[in-house]
Image (tube, rainbow, N blue to C red):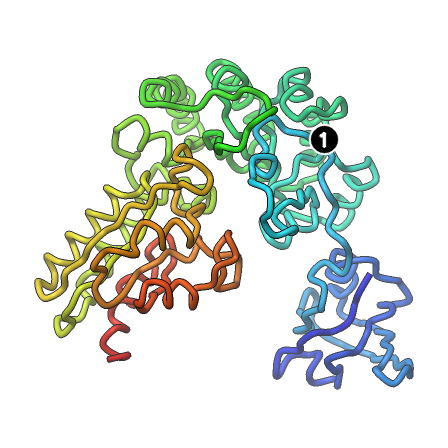
Amino acid sequence: MSAKIRSISPGSIGDEVGLEVGDVILSINDNKITDIIDYRFLTSDDYLEIEVEKSNGEVWVYEIEKDYDEDLGIDFESGIMDKAKSCSNKCVFCFIDQLPKGMRNTLYFKDDDSRLSFLQGNFVTLTNMKDEDIDRIIKYRISPINVSVHTTNSELRKKMLNNRFAGNVYERLKKLAEAGIHMNTQIVVCPGLNNGEELIRTVNDLYKLYPYINNIAAVPVGVTKYREGLYPLKTYEKEMALWEIKNLEDVQNKYIKEIGTPFVRLADEFYVMAGIDVPEDEFYGDYEQIEDGIGMIRYLRRVIDGTIDSLKDSLKGKITFVTGTSAYDEIKNVASKIENKNSNLNVQVEKIKNNFFGETITVAGLITASDIIDQLKDKNLGDYLVIPKNMLRANERVFLDDITVEELEEALKIKVILCEYTGDDLIEAINGIGEEE
């Protein structure tokens, strides 16, 4: 456990009372802290006595009076003050098991940690948890958490997760719901396993726990070319994707009438594979599932239509957008809107095939720099290359294959512009071209 302070926000309570970078918090109100959840819970009180070990070894006690739940403004060297709990499942669809050899060690680590679910939005299966861990979630009001359910069929879940303890997920979800813990859920849909009627069964089971189960994100299984020796999964193609969409519509319409939302939503990939348009804007509510790939297309259209008028008329030149095969047509439409607004801009869109993981992986977020370089090195890309930030590791300028943005720029002899994959800052980023010139 490491409760060493990494940074303190200027003007925060921690700053005002004189806490320092490098201080180690030993206890709060005589309670030892084992991880970030303890810290968050214990610092919610309006009166604190914090025991701190200074860098010279001295132990000081700080007395703090504050508003209830007011944050101290402290960040720690280790985000959760502990090692992340690893996953003991061997899921038939696990993407990590489908990675090639020789990548960064951190990419092969499977986390299944409720603390990361609460803090970072990671999905957990609840399978790798003891009963006391569930009780701790309830005690500390860790809410919301994100849960990978996949199926409520006990025997099928044991098979899909390759874990004989995986069948009790519904009992645990029910216990959390009865305690008032809110949950977002995810289903990785695998044709021939948990799709079709099994998917509808799972949706209906989870709906019984609404509103504590807020929603369900159903995403298609991703299959790379590195599956030798693994479970023989089927992948979605056009007809199967269309069938899945139609099969779920009655359930979605039923819940729209009852609670005003479809409760379960399919990832955009289903609609792209099926060759049909995504649902209308109101179907996606507040777009709370967008990081699961749900509603990205509709949201991008809304954002571009709402910001295109702010595009500078003074901009000139050629820029190139990079995207995956699934979003190519949509990004082409964005490019056309930009050119229609400013005819002095030439916007080219390059579709990158995923040779690194295999062409069955079509989303932009899994494109590597090596594929971008290989497929674009001999092309006239213009002055700027626009890349969505979801191609990079979180909060870093590094691609999945460890190539940096700067190395990509050097290889292609072009300046890279980064923007959010939802398009929130796309027009603003393009407008910034003029500032650099």
Write down the quadrant of residue 231 in the picture: top right
Q: Which quadrant is the N terminus positioned in?
A: bottom right
**Residue ID for mark 1:** 172
- The residue closer to the viewer here, 237 or 153, is 237
Residue 242 lies, with reference to residue 147, above or below; the image says above
The three-letter code of the residue at mark 1 reads: Arg
With 16 as the anchor, is 425 left or right in this view? Answer: left
- The residue closer to the viewer here, 184 or 332, is 332
Write down the quadrant of residue 277 in the picture: top left
Which residue is found at the position 42% from the left and 54% from the top?
Answer: 369
- For label 1, count other residues whose C-alpha is less than 10 Å away and answer few (under 14), some (14-19) or many (20+): some
Which residue is found at the position 23% from the left and 51% from the top?
Answer: 349
Residue 9 lies, with reference to residue 126, above or below; the image says below
Write down the quadrant of residue 249 in the picture: top left
Give the x, y percent position of residue 411.
Answer: 37, 63
Q: Secondary structure at mark 1?
A: helix
Give the x, y percent position of residue 190.
Answer: 50, 23
Give the x, y percent position of residue 259.
Answer: 45, 32
Q: Give the mark count.
A: 1
Give the x, y percent position of residue 320.
Answer: 24, 58
Which residue is found at the position 42% from the left and 21% from the top?
Answer: 251
User: Residue at the front extreme?
Assistant: 378
- The residue closer to the viewer here, 58 or 273, is 273
Q: Which quadrant is the C terminus positioned in?
A: bottom left
